Amino acid sequence: MSLYAAYAGNLDARLMSRRAPHSPLRGTGWLNDWRLTFGGEQMGWEGSLATVVEAPRSQVFVALYDLAPMDEDSMDRWEGVGLDIYRRMRVRVHTLEGEEATWMYVLNGYEGGLPSARYLGEIADAAESAGAPHDYVMELRKRPC
């Protein structure tokens, strides 16, 4: 098993149970000194796609999954790794138990552009379902789209 950190729609455990049915949710945490942003407008169907970029004093709420080897290929296909949309990146996530070495998907595109209202709402709903703090969810809901 490898530890995967989800930060956008994959925060939703119900969605992840369909995308990676053999990979249980381990918990949640924070990706410190990174921020959620959007980019690659030309890569998505309806606006820019979620990604993270380094940003001192910022945080991104994440859900941690023990990703089973049999689910890794399907997740890579879902995230467009073979199409060069996203790539895997190793990061450290802060949890109540301490720092965890994990990996996540980051966009292979430049930051910029706006997400669709539907997509942004999906991300906010997923964050809320994962137990993100109210102020974090409200910040997502107020973002321009």
Image (cartoon, rainbow, N blue to C red):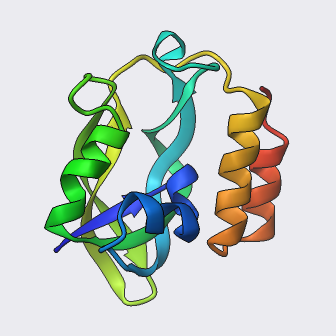
Count of number-bearing discs: 0
Q: Is residue 126 above or below residue 54?
A: below
Above/below status of 64 relative to 112? below
Q: Is residue 58 visible?
A: no
Determine whether, in the image, residue 112 is placed left or right of residue 81. Answer: right
Residue ranking furthest to the top: 42
Residue 134 spot, x, y in % from top left: 80, 68
Left or right? Give the position of 20 relative to 122: left
Q: Which of the two residues, 31 or 23, is positioned nearer the viewer here?
A: 23
The residue shown at (58%, 64%) is 12
Q: Which one is in front, 91 or 32?
A: 91
In the depicted view, which residue is nearer to us: 22 or 126? 22
Q: Quadrant of residue 66?
A: bottom left
Q: Quadrant of the N terminus?
A: bottom left
Which residue is located at x 66 percent, y 75 percent? 131
Residue 45 falls left or right of residue 75: right
Residue in the picture at 48% in, 73% down: 29
Residue 54 in percent (x, y) is at: 41, 40
Place of residue 55 in the rendered image (x, y in percent of width and height, measured from the top left): 48, 41
Can residue 127 be seen here? yes
- Which quadrant is home to the C terminus? top right
Residue at image location 35% in from the left, 63% down from the top: 20
